[in-house]
């Protein structure tokens, strides 16, 4: 029985369709893992430790991505707070300047 290896064109077309590696998600990982399992040589299967390592790497990447999104959200909110403080300080300075008695 002949087993056809997974070619690089399969992975390339997936990446091209998504436009970048950053666009890949857990569904893509499951598709790639399923294809890998279907195409592996039955006489020399993939090591369980290797498969678990791949899953752990994906989990770590997903966690890092979520952390990055959370930090960006916090940074955006802090930018809004700083902007509001600057606007308030400018309004107070303008009010104080208009109430200063002239000599």
Image: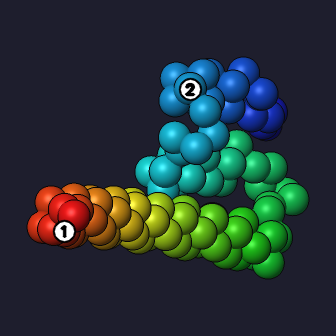
Q: Nearer the viewer, residue 70 or 87?
A: 87
**Would residue 11 be found to the left or right of residue 34 on screen?**
right
Quadrant (top left/top right/bottom left/bottom right) for the N terminus: top right
Q: Residues within 10 Å of mark 2 (few under 14, many from 20)?
A: few
> Looking at the image, which residue is at 68% across and 48% down?
36
> Looking at the image, which residue is at 56% across and 26% down?
19
| Percent x, y of residue 63 | 55, 72
**Would residue 51 be found to the left or right of residue 15 on screen?**
right
Say what secondary structure mark 1 lies in: loop
> Looking at the image, which residue is at 69% across and 25% down?
12
| Residue lying farthest to the right in this orientation | 44
Q: How many numbered callouts?
A: 2
Residue 14, label in figure: none
Q: Marks 1 and 2: which is nearer the front?
A: 1
49 w.r.t. 99: above or below: below
Residue 19, label in figure: 2
**Would residue 92 be found to the left or right of residue 78 on screen?**
left
> Looking at the image, which residue is at 52% across and 23% down?
17
The type of colouring in the image is rainbow
Per the image, the residue denoted by label 1 is 100
Say what secondary structure mark 2 lies in: loop
Q: Nearer the viewer, residue 16 or 63?
A: 63
**Would residue 48 be found to the left or right of residue 14 on screen?**
right
| Percent x, y of residue 79 | 40, 61
């Amino acid at each position: 029985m002949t087993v056809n290896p997974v070619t690089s064109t399969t992975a390339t077309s997936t990446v091209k369709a998504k436009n970048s590696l950053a666009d890949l998600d857990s569904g893509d990982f499951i598709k790639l893992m399923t294809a890998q399992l279907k195409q592996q040589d039955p006489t020399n299967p993939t090591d369980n430790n290797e498969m678990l390592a791949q899953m752990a790497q994906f989990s770590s990447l997903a966690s890092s991505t979520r952390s990055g999104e959370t930090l960006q959200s916090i940074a955006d909110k802090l930018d809004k707070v700083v902007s509001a403080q600057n606007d308030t300080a400018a309004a107070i300075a303008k009010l104080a300047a208009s109430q200063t008695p002239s000599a």
